[in-house]
Image (tube, rainbow, N blue to C red):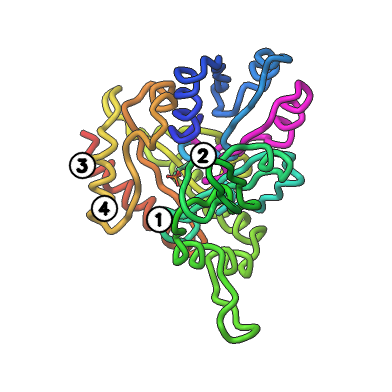
Amino acid sequence: MEHHSNLLPWRMLQDLRGIKLEVVELREDGSLDMDALKSVLSGRTKLVCCTHVSNVLGTINPVAEIAHLAHSVGAVLVVDAAQSLPHLPVDVGALGCDFLSFSGHKMLAPLGIGVLYGRKALLAELSPFQYGGGMIRDIVSDEFAWAELPGKFEAGTPDVAGAVALGGAVGPDEGRRLEGSVDYLTSLGMEWVQTHETTLTEHALQGLERIQGIQVYGPQEAQKRCGLISFNVEKDGAIVDDHLVAQLLDQAGIAVRAGGHCAHPLIRRLGVQGAVRVSFYVYNTIEEIDFFLQTLQDIVTRHLLP
Ligand SMILES: Cc1ncc(COP(=O)(O)O)c(C=O)c1O
């Protein structure tokens, strides 16, 4: 279920450090196989990592339960929240995770900025992963001391503009705040964001069910997923090229993503070459979902079906 960004670093550690990587499989309904997870955990497990929400299936994983299982064998839990934090309330304390990361570009902020949360005691133990200005307290001959957290992980000149756009900042006039996307989403309320997306997703799922030849991946219930739906169109027993479907939607002014979604093992597991992914956010409306459904229906009827 993992995005390549939560797979390749561990695969690289396999080569560099000789760690053993175990992959927990999915169930047919697009949920994680929790029995398989339990069966691979042991006293030798150092780290468990998972995505909070799949960027292909939309599945919301039971992170608190996974944290409990990981901690029961003394492992650390790393959570990829790139697809969850922009869409639903996330409380690292309630989830019980040790590390959690998310990206600005999925939550109305610029590309190239993101956040890593870590439990302070664990961050204090960790060595820096890159070196440069601003990350040491002092250096005398070959003796040096790392800067206080988070400075020791922030080598070099930071992306200040990106950080302000994501997290906001206190302006030069006292009390004046420059709003970042975190402020904006907080003002909307993450409960509202989740409810809004669930309403749109439910409407879209029901509509997709009525269109001939549509194959939807992931949980069927809107409550079990986030605001995205990956699907393919089937014609004469074969899957229509996902890029063609995306292009036809694009011609009607609807922007979707097609392809492997940086999750190739999952796409292969689904038995396809790629999938079309339609996704919703705070600015989308029921009318837009209806327009998407009508357009897809027209594409299927006019272009794809005999
Ligand atoms: C679930 C998930 N994890 C990780 C990423 C990658 O984020 P970044 O490119 O900011 O590392 C994405 C997509 O951008 C994603 O959907």
At mark 1, the secondary structure is loop
> Callout 3, which amino acid?
His
Marked residue nearer the N-terminal end (4 or 1): 1
- The residue lying furthest to the bottom in this view is 173
Name the mark on residue 281: none
The residue beneath circle 2 is: 129
Judging depth in this view, the residue of 176 and 157 nearest the camera is: 157
Residue 15, percent from left and from top: 45, 17
> Callout 4, which amino acid?
Asp
Please name the residue shown 39% across and 35% down the image.
262
Marked residue nearer the N-terminal end (2 or 4): 2
Residue at mark 2: C-beta within 8 A of ligand 1: no
At mark 4, the secondary structure is helix
- Discs 2, 3 touching: Cβ within 8 Å: no
The residue beneath circle 3 is: 303
The residue beneath circle 4 is: 250
At mark 2, the secondary structure is loop
At mark 3, the secondary structure is helix
Residue 173, percent from left and from top: 59, 86
Judging depth in this view, the residue of 38 and 125 nearest the camera is: 125
Q: Magenta part of the protein: which range? A: 57-82
| Left or right relative to 293: residue 136 | right
Q: CA distance from mark 4 to mark 1?
A: 22 Å
| Left or right relative to 259: residue 210 | right
Q: CA distance from mark 3 to mark 1?
A: 35 Å
- Discs 4, 1 touching: Cβ within 8 Å: no
The residue beneath circle 1 is: 111
Q: Decide whether residue 63 is among the magenta residues.
A: yes
Label 4 or label 3, whichever lies nearer to me, is 4
